[in-house]
């Protein structure tokens, strides 16, 4: 089954590549036709159009390297193989350059020898796990205005910078032929080195995803912060950020300050008809805390606030102080006291939950009851 | 084929997730005017990917509105001593109204003075960018207004050596960073230290591939756009270093002057339509000799000027400037030529 899936994947990739080739091949031919008398400019355009070492390049070395180091995510359990595969790819590119030297004149041979040296240096660094520095992906990029590969000072391609009356002139044909090997090799080296960076990329992506998930949960799941609370908590985060050089983790707690809300308050000994009342809750000050899971989800949150409730009950003061406990950001339960009477307060979410449970119990009872009746 | 990924990041305003469609269309249309498009067509060459963060502000404002509406009915008449709180709650509830103050100014203030809001925005953009460069051979970014600050801060997260999510520039840095109506200095979190200071952070072009975040940095400002003026981004002549500044095109400080519509001088597309902006941009995105010739450039500039009232006047101003002689000039031949040209 797995082999079948791999085959299907490879087939799709081949079809996509064939479609791209059909679309892009005339583009590459057009560039060669138009700029053939200025080989270095032509090579820059061919590189921009991905004609050398890209999907549309049909030469065997390109196909071989792209098969060895395919673009796309590498499964986590295969990441260890990545540097070896990339080094193998560089070995293939070196062999390709060496094999083509004999076909060229002295000047081109010198250029190709310098290129082989640079590829060898990159391969050695990769194999020895040394920093690639200037030999890394971006060092192999072409700067057409500077007429150089950005990180390869020793690779002097100015010898390819000739202008001919016609593209068929020997000087231009020789420059184009050697230049294609240089530009194709550079593109393939970039492909191999980018592949070798896969683990670095995946680690950075994972870290960014987790951080984004945490901030999303902070604003979506944690208790809502009114602007003044957001400011206070923001200043606390700023302090943590200063200590961490600007790279502080997402907060795992929040202060609650002058936070208005609504709840249902029950006072047992209040006059009939006003025992259960909708009340305004003012959380004077409070604290809510949670932990983060490794994938950016929130663990259980617990919090507590000092509160003052306001409701309209005959014979009782409207304001009642109390303490409120929070669970998982949504559910809050408070104990209030006033006029010698103790009250219990539920946040709207909790009261909705209680009501739903009660309703479900009633429904369940009704269903069971009717069921029995039908029997 | 692997395309050059071109990120677009918006500024302040009431943007939705499809905000970049017209900008992408404008870019493609402008690019198509030049001969380079025949060899390297826009659709073959570039893949435009929008970066979006306005939803974070929208969600926060909507939550405030909903929470305030829930409690305000019970706050009237307000409990004694809670009048100020009622006012604050009313204000929080009104933050979701689509007015200029709420959709523009409030977003700026939230980003600058609420580090938790800024943290969320940066994290969202960081994730979008990393997902966006997956498999890309080359990538660049065009940021506008507040987006310049968001992008700057996100790039610090992406490339600073001390970042927990760092990438090595020599493996991943971008080609072109274009900052249009750059407000990154006025919004910078400089209190966090040098790495967040826009002149000292990693967000710079560099001739060495092991440094900086890009090969070419364009800073574009419209002379009549008042938004990027306070704490204007104006680096010294050796920023980021002398070797980089010696490379033509590595840092380009571009000033625009033509006005299509006075109320649009801060608009992203107003910036892009100006050839003085999009020609250096395209030349930077495709750094090859002959990309948009001098003749093409002159024709584009002239055509742009002809169509706009302010630009027409600018042409006349330029003509007058060209006629001016030095204060102490007493060469009668030049004086007579000048008088002749003035009246002809």
Image: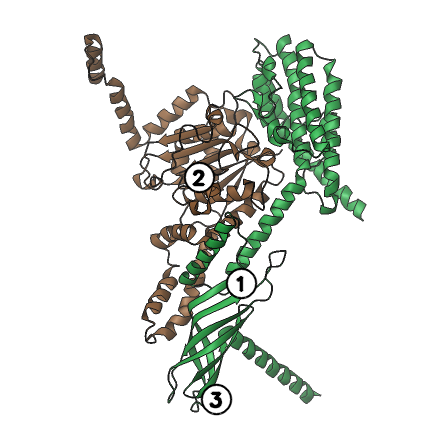
Q: Secondary structure at mark 2?
A: loop
Is A3 situated left or right of A48 in this image? right
Q: Tell me if I can see residue B114 in this picture.
A: yes
**What is the number of the mark on residue B198?**
2
Confirm whether circles 1 and 2 share one chain: no
Cα distance between the residues tagged 3 and 1: 33 Å
Q: Residues within 10 Å of mark 1 (few under 14, many from 20)?
A: some
User: Residue under mark 3: which chain is it in?
Assistant: A
Residue A142 place in picture, x, y as percent:
58, 25
- In the image, is residue B231 above or below residue B93? above
- In the image, is residue A64 above or below residue A220? above
Q: Nearer the viewer, residue B269 or B38?
A: B269
Question: What is chain B's hue in the picture?
Answer: brown
Cα distance between the residues tagged 2 and 3: 62 Å
Residue B84 place in picture, x, y as percent:
32, 68
Q: Which residue is disc 3 drawn over? A: A268
Is A196 situated left or right of A41 in this image? right
Q: Secondary structure at mark 1?
A: loop
Q: Quadrant of residue A189?
A: top right
Q: Could you tell which of marks 3 and 1 lies nearer the N-terminus? A: 1
Q: Which residue is disc 1 drawn over? A: A221
Q: Residue at x 38, y 64 (%)?
A: B93
């Amino acid at each position: 089954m797995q082999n079948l899936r791999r085959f299907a994947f490879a087939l799709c990739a081949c079809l996509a590549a064939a479609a791209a080739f059909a679309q892009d091949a005339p583009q590459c031919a057009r560039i060669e036709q138009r700029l053939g008398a200025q080989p270095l400019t032509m090579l820059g355009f061919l590189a921009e159009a991905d004609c050398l070492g890209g999907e549309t390049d049909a030469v065997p070395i390109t196909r071989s390297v792209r098969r060895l180091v395919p673009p796309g995510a590498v499964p986590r359990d295969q990441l260890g193989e990545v540097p070896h595969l990339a080094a193998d790819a560089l070995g293939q590119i070196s062999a390709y350059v060496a094999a083509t030297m004999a076909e060229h004149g002295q000047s081109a041979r010198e250029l190709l020898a310098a290129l082989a040296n640079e590829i060898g240096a990159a391969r050695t660094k990769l194999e020895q796990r040394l920093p690639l520095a200037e030999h890394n992906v971006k060092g192999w990029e072409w700067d057409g205005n500077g007429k150089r590969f950005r990180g390869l000072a020793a690779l002097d391609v100015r010898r390819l910078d000739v202008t001919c009356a016609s593209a068929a002139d020997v000087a231009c044909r020789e420059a184009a032929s050697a230049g294609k090997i240089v530009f194709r090799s550079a593109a393939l080296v970039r492909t191999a080195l980018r592949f070798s960076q896969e683990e670095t990329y995946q680690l950075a992506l994972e870290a960014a995803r987790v951080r984004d998930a945490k901030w999303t949960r902070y604003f979506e799941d944690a208790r809502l912060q009114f602007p003044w609370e957001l400011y206070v908590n923001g200043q606390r985060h700023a302090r943590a950020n200063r200590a961490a050089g600007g790279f502080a983790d997402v907060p795992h707690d929040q202060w609650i300050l002058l936070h208005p809300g609504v709840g249902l308050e029950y006072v047992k000994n209040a006059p009939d008809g006003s025992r259960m009342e909708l009340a305004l809750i003012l959380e004077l000050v409070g604290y809510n805390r949670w932990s983060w899971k490794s994938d950016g989800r929130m663990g259980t949150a617990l919090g507590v606030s000092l509160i003052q409730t306001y409701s309209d009950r005959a014979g009782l003061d409207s304001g009642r102080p109390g303490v409120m406990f929070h669970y998982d950001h949504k559910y809050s339960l408070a104990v209030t006291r006033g006029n010698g009477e103790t009250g219990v307060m539920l946040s709207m979410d909790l009261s909705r939950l209680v009501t739903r449970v009660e309703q479900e119990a009633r429904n369940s009872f009704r269903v069971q009851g009717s069921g029995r009746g039908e029997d | 084929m692997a395309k050059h990924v071109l990120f677009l990041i918006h500024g302040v305003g009431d943007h939705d997730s499809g905000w970049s469609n017209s900008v992408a269309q404008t870019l493609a249309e402008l690019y198509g005017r030049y001969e380079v498009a025949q060899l390297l067509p826009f659709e073959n060459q570039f893949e435009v990917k929008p970066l979006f963060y306005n939803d974070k502000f929208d969600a926060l404002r909507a939550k405030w509105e909903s929470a305030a509406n829930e409690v305000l009915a019970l706050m009237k008449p307000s409990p004694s001593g809670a009048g100020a709180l009622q006012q604050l709650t009313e204000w929080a509830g009104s933050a979701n109204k689509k007015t200029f103050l709420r959709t523009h100014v409030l977003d700026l203030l939230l980003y600058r003075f609420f580090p938790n809001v800024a943290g969320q925005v940066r994290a969202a953009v960081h994730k979008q960018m990393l997902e966006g460069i997956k498999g890309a051979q080359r990538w660049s970014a065009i940021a506008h207004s507040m987006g310049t600050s968001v992008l700057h801060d996100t790039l610090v997260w992406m490339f600073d050596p001390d970042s927990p999510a760092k990438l090595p520039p020599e493996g991943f840095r971008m080609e072109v960073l274009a900052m249009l109506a750059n407000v990154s200095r006025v919004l910078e979190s400089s209190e966090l230290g040098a790495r967040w200071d826009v002149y000292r952070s990693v967000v710079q072009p560099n001739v060495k591939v092991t440094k900086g975040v890009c090969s070419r940095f364009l800073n574009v400002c419209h002379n009549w756009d008042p938004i990027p003026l306070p704490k204007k981004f104006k680096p010294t002549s050796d920023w980021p270093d002398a070797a980089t500044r010696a490379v033509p095109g590595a840092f380009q400080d571009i000033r625009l002057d033509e006005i299509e519509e006075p109320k649009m001088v801060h608009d992203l597309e107003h910036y892009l339509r100006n050839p003085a902006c999009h020609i250096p941009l395209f030349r930077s995105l495709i750094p090859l000799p002959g990309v948009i010739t001098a003749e093409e450039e002159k024709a584009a500039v002239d055509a742009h000027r002809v169509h706009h009232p302010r630009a027409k006047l600018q042409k006349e101003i330029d003509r007058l400037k060209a006629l001016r002689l030095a204060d102490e000039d007493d060469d009668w031949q030049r004086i007579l030529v000048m008088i002749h040209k003035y009246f002809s």
